[in-house]
Amino acid sequence: MDINKMENDDEKGTPDKKQIEAEEKEIMLKADNENMDASAELNVDVEGPVKAALSGDVTEQGREVKPKFIPIGAIKMPGFFTKNLDKEKSKEDESAIEKDIENEKTDDISKPKHNRLQFLHTCPFTQFLHRPKSNEGNTPNKRNFFNVKYPKVFQRNTANAEATLASMETLEDKLDSPNDGMENVKLDVADTEEGKVATKLPLKERIRQKKFIIDDIVVCALVLLVLLAVIIGIIIGAQAGPPTERPLRLGRYMTTLTACGPVEGTLDEGVYNFYNIPYAVPPIKEKRFTYAQPLNNISMCWNGTREAHERGPLCIQFLENGTITGEEDCLTLDIVTPHVRYDSPLPVVVLIGANTLAGGISPTQPSALYARTKEVVFVRPNFRLGPFGFLALDVISKTKYPETSGNYAISDLLVALQWVKHNIKHFGGDPESVTLLGHRAGATLTAALTTVTKAHKLYSRVWLSSPSVIFPGEPLEQAHKSNDQFKQISKCNDIDCLRNISAMEILTATPDIWLGSNGGTLPVAGEFKHSWLVLDGDLLRVHAYESWDAQKEAKESGKDKVFRPMIFGTTQHSDHSDLLRNKHLNWTIEMVEKMVNSSIIGEKNLTSSIFKHFNKSYEGLVGLISSIRTICPLVSLARLRLSAPMYVVMGAGAGGGAVGSGIAGINSDVEAILGTFDSEGPEQRRFMAAMQQLFYYYVWHGRLSGPETGLIAVAQDLLPLHGLPVCDLLIQEDIVPRYAHVD
């Protein structure tokens, strides 16, 4: 305190120093006992000069103290409760504040008023590119790396905090001040929590003052991440091609593409059904008795979108009861798929089924349930049967060069597989994973198709259920002579006549003996066999066995690097039929013995040896017929010649349901695969599960889940089958494969 000033004060009649000290102590004691409220206004009730100053009265020194307005956030306190302020520091701060205000005004003028990207100014990364320069030189302001004012909890404490209330030891007498020792003291929140000042400012103000907080950094980071994700998504979407799943029309109709135009299917039972899609030129008029031709010309296609909602007609054929069904214009296919998308294509199963090569409705129909649950795409093509599919005549061969005729059905399947190769991707299928599932006569056709060189790249693997092992070995000229009877009945000696007569006239001219099947009966010496397949010299050039031997040799030598595996299979009672079972109301032992003795078995005196393997009942009789016609011929082909896996469905597991106890009919395996098997008990359900595991694992992986070689018995489980002694006997006696069924 200035001593000269004190002396001047004494001369002016100031109170005694001791009196002032007494008053100060009294005020200090009272102030300590009162709770001071840090609200917008605080009235300190004291006596003496302070009380007079607060109330606006006249003090003892004769000075009148006027009350002063206290703004919100400030506390009206006596001047001696605060520290002496450094006047020079205050002047410097005031000048610095004025300069900041002028700089902000110039910045506001220079900035555009309407900046659509103004929100990016809050981002520290953009501020880093445009952070302010210091007044001294061109070095950046080193206050912060991103020029961001962080809350104090993230800052380093570099200066001692100034106390809000003055220490009692540093109180001074400021009665000589213009406001008689009274000051407006504002509690600066930034002194204690400096970083929170920016949080109280609106976003626009923080942008203007370039004062940011940690929340702004988080927001900027999130915005940048979202923008980056959007950009990556756009790039990936542009490279991914078409959408994963096409949209539905009216919630039910699905449209996709083919090489000949768009087609529209329907959504039903959780799968998409596309029916009656043409895959070849209609084989009518001048196209009758010719190989199938693909739809490779736009004039053969359709305009607009083709509705594929309803099933098309079957190819014209003979049914097993002698009736006729179907139409000649029939080269279409059906598709059942769980997804219509381009990513994650699914394996394709092509169903090729027919009871005989003359006709007969096969159970190989697409399953909506297993398309969805097993994640596969089913394709079922129609193909020509009977004389429309196989008739080989010299008058037909002469119309072509080189001369050839017959096997039109094989050309149908070849073109159908080409269609699948080029179009199945539009239906969610994988053209590189195509499994051919052939059943009965369809399996015979499929087996013949595997010998066609043109077809080798159109499929991946083959599953043959109860095929024939009898394939043509005679030249085409011999087939012409065998079929000469057809010309005599139809009275057609040229191709024009054959193409102009009606379809019904062609079926009527077909000899009944061609329609008969030697299955379901025991063989007799000299029985007639008509083979629909011929060595046409174009599609089928060599005997099937020779072709398979060549493929096997190429596989073993490594020349065929992409070997297409084959699986053979049948059932224990494949020759069971209602016709045979109903031949006698009750099958007795005598009836069974009489039928066996009257067959080739009795002629060779093998009756007693055979009954060591079969009992004298209907089940035993059917088992013997099936062994001669189907099981043992397949064993000789699959196991002894091709070393391919083979399964046999046993009656102990597949028996029951619609067939009867202990009988495994010829359709049991395919019905189990496609889910149409009549499973009444737990044994049948276990059989279905075992059969489906065997097939669909093969479809997905190209190999069996069980043994890769040998015989497999399929009952309630998959078990190895250690040989069939009866087959060794029948092969040794030259009964097998001589009397195997033809188709």
Image (cartoon, helix red, strand yellow):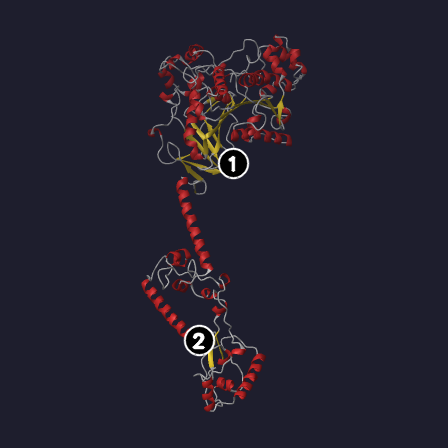
Which residue is at 37% across, 59% downward? 139
In-front residue for pair 309/668: 668
Question: Tag 1's secondary structure?
Answer: helix
Q: Position of residue 72 (x, y in %)?
A: 46, 75
In-front residue for pair 726/553: 553
Nearest-to-viewer mark from 1 and 2: 2
In-front residue for pair 436/173: 173
Q: Amino acid at mark 2?
A: Asp
In-front residue for pair 408/73: 73
Residue 330 in sight in this render: no
Which residue is at 37% across, 71% downward? 98
Label 2, residues with CA under 10 Å away: few <14, some 14-19, many ≥20: few
Q: Position of residue 743 (x, y in %)?
A: 51, 18
Q: Which mark is residue 86?
A: 2
Question: Tag 2's secondary structure?
Answer: loop
Residue at mark 1:
372
Do callouts 1 and 2 mark residues in contact (Cβ within 8 Å)? no
Label 1, residues with CA under 10 Å away: few <14, some 14-19, many ≥20: some
Which residue is at 46% across, 66% downward? 197
Mark 1 or mark 2, which has the lower sequence index? 2
Q: Amino acid at mark 1?
A: Arg
Q: Quadrant of residue 672?
A: top right
Distance (Cα) linking label 1 and label 2? 86 Å
Q: Position of residue 360 (x, y in %)?
A: 50, 23
